[in-house]
Image: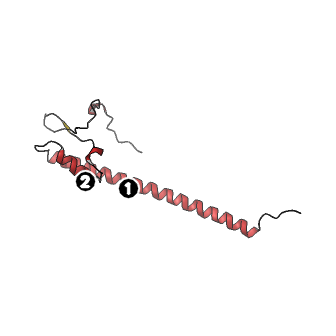
């Protein structure tokens, strides 16, 4: 006695289900990639705006406490500990950096070209 595995209708239903599932998976992946790119662009625009504000209005007395707090709020960070901030005034003056700034990090040695991710 041979076993009949499945009927034609069940096989068509399974194949259709597989095609629909793969299509939904691809659409979800494309949507996620687009949303991620949009969020990165939004954060980049906020960082550029923050940098522009720092150039227009250099920090007053008190160092980086207020600019760090403002940048952390605008970037929706949990705390200022997630942010490394370095301000280089336009005039020949020493740079101001966050207290958590790594000692071995040289700003002039960094590659400042735009990278496509």
Residue 27 pos. (x, y %): 52, 60
Image position of 1 (left or right of 7) = right
Label 2: how many Cα within 10 Å (few below 14, some 14–19, many 20+): few
Quadrant location of residue 110? top left
Q: Which type of secondary structure does the marked residue at label 2 adopt?
A: helix
Residue 56 position, x and y percent, is 15, 47
**How many numbered dots are placed on residues in this image?**
2
How far, Cα to Cα, is label 2 from label 1?
19 Å
Dot in front, 2 or 1: 2
- Residue at label 2? 73
Query: What residue is drawn where x is 22% and y is 38%?
Result: 99
Residue under the point 27% across and 41% down = 84
Residue situated in front as seen by the camera: 92 or 64: 64
Q: Residue at x 38, y 42 (%)?
A: 115
Residue sitting at x 26%, y 48%: 48
The numbered mark, 2 or 1, whose residue comes first in the sequence reads 1
Q: Residue 38 carries which label?
A: 1
Q: Where is residue 65 in the image (x, y as percent from the top left)?
A: 18, 45
Q: Which residue lies furthest to the right in this view?
A: 1
Q: What element carries label 1?
A: helix
Image quarter in which the N terminus is found: bottom right
- Using the rendered view, name the quadrant where residue 86 is placed: top left
Asked if 58 appears above or below 27 in the picture, the reply is: above
Left or right: residue 5 compared with residue 40: right
> Looking at the picture, how far across and down is residue 61, in whole percent?
10, 43
76 relative position to 54: left or right:
right
In this picture, is 93 found above or below 29?
above
């Amino acid at each position: 006695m041979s076993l009949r595995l499945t009927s034609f209708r069940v096989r068509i239903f399974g194949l259709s289900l597989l095609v629909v599932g793969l299509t939904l998976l691809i659409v979800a992946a494309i949507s996620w990639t687009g949303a991620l790119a949009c969020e990165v662009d939004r954060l980049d625009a906020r960082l550029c705006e923050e940098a522009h504000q720092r150039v227009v209005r250099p920090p007053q007395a008190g160092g980086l406490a207020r600019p760090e707090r403002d940048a952390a709020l605008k970037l929706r960070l949990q705390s200022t500990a997630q942010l490394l901030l370095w301000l280089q005034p336009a005039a020949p003056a020493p740079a101001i950096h966050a207290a958590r700034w790594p000692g071995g990090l040289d700003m002039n040695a960094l590659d400042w070209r735009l990278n496509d991710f």
